[in-house]
Amino acid sequence: MVPKNTICLWYDGDALDAANFYARTFPDSSVGTVHRAPGDYPDGKQGDVLVVEFTVVGIPCIGLNGGPGIKHSEAFSFQIATDDQAETDRLWNAIVGNGGQESACGWYKDKWGLSWQITPRALTAAIADPDRAAAKRAFEAMMQMGKIDVATIEAARRG
């Protein structure tokens, strides 16, 4: 069944490359139907890949090869909850190692400009700690990080 709500992500001709990368990198991700343009359009020709249906960690998406006119921004990001440091490292290294760019507090951009947050569950638990002093220590530790270091977050939480 086709979902009623699908995230549409704009690409400059490389939606299929992005979808294939996401499918290889993230669990519960896959590439579905590839639609080719039935005629020429401003940034492509008949037969070019126009739309790619794909899933990222269970979320239905389409990649639209709309051309260079629109860029991704941090106003939209995928947030991926990780269970441990190994999973955090694997995902972080996959994206950054594939031409992505590191940012702060667990954020980065992939090589297509899409923003991602790799967020260990330990971080979410720490900043939601009912002990507000513990939550503040964990939050302040996070603010100094690029990739999140679970051991440092847990140590900060403990004080």
Image (spheres, rainbow, N blue to C red):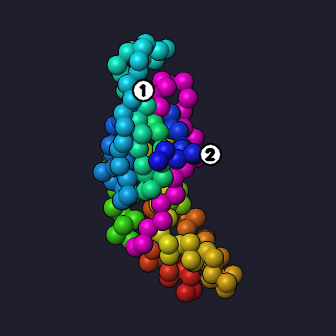
Residue range corresponding to the magenta coloring:
64-84
Residue 11 visible at all: no
Task: Provide the residue designation for mark 1.
Answer: 50
Q: Residue 108 appears at what percent x and percent y? A: 48, 51
Q: For the residue labelled by badge 1, is the local secondary structure a helix, a strand or a loop?
A: strand
Residue 129 visible at all: yes
Instruction: Tell me if residue 153 is in the magenta stretch.
Output: no
Task: Provide the residue designation for mark 2.
Answer: 75
Q: Residue 50 appears at what percent x and percent y? A: 42, 26
Q: For the residue labelled by badge 2, is the local secondary structure a helix, a strand or a loop?
A: loop
In depth, the one of 138 and 64 nearer the eye is: 64
Q: Which of the marked residues, 2 or 1, is nearer the chain's N terminus?
A: 1
Residue 41 higher or lower than 155, as above or below: above
Q: Which amino acid is tagged 1?
A: Leu
Q: Which amino acid is tagged 2?
A: Ala
Residue 54 higher or lower than 38, as above or below: below
Q: Quadrant of the C terminus?
A: bottom right
Q: Residue 76 appears at what percent x and percent y? A: 58, 46
In depth, the one of 99 and 48 nearer the eye is: 48
> Which residue is farthest front?
1
Q: Nearer the viewer, mark 2 or mark 1?
A: 1
